[in-house]
Amino acid sequence: MRRRFALLLATAVPAAFAAGCGGTSLGDPVATNRVELPKSYRFNPAVIVIKAGTSVTWTNHDNFTHTVKVGDGPDHKLDRGKSVTIRFAAAGTYKYVCTLQSQDMRGEVIVK
């Protein structure tokens, strides 16, 4: 019995660890210039694709304050019902985050 438990433990722990170490996908890119912050501590959609020169608007529909910080840019505070619009002039991939819930709320703007 003890040997069977040790074998189970030896196989289950690495499998559980490997399952938890997978990359966290932000989802497939969506062609839009609007990102919503619904009542769920996330950006929807998290990954968007736009053309250079386009502005993106983030709108907070959650009951809690969030922020939007793109790269090294300023931290834009969004109280409930508020929006922020940021223009992306150059092609590239820009990562953004809510600095208040950075573990859960991340995204990317892909500019072509």
Image: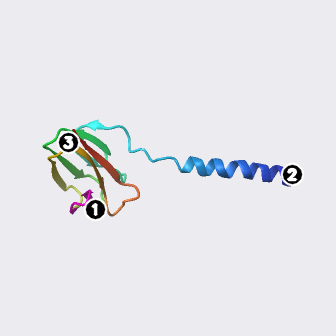
Residue 77 position within the rendered picture, expressed as x and y whole percent measured from the top left: 22, 62
| Left or right of 86, for residue 18 | right
First reached walking from the N terminus: tag 2 or tag 1: 2
Q: Which mark is residue 33?
A: 3
What residue is shown with label 2?
Answer: 1
Q: Secondary structure at mark 2?
A: loop
Instruction: Give the CA separation, mark 2 to mark 1.
Output: 53 Å
Which circle marks residue 65 in the picture? Answer: 1
Q: Residue 39, can we see it?
A: no
Asked if the residue under mark 1 is in contact with the one under mark 3, i.e. CB atoms within 8 Å, the reply is no
Q: Mark 3 vs mark 1: which is more N-terminal?
A: 3
Q: Residues within 10 Å of mark 3 (few under 14, many from 20)?
A: some
45, above or below 65, in the image: above
Q: Amino acid at mark 1?
A: Thr
> Is 16 positioned to the left or the right of 80 in the image?
right
Across and down, in percent, residue 5 comes to 80, 52
Total count of labels: 3
Q: Which region shows up in magenta? A: 68-75
Q: Which numbered disc flags the more N-terminal residue, 3 or 2?
A: 2
Residue 7, can we see it? yes
Question: What is the image's colouring?
Answer: rainbow
Q: Nearer the viewer, residue 103 or 79?
A: 103
Eye-nearest disc, 3 or 1: 3
Residue at 26% in and 58% down: 69
Task: Assign a secondary structure to mark 1.
Answer: loop
Q: Amino acid at mark 3?
A: Asn
Q: Nearer the viewer, residue 41 or 52?
A: 52
Residue in front for this viewpoint, 92 or 1: 92
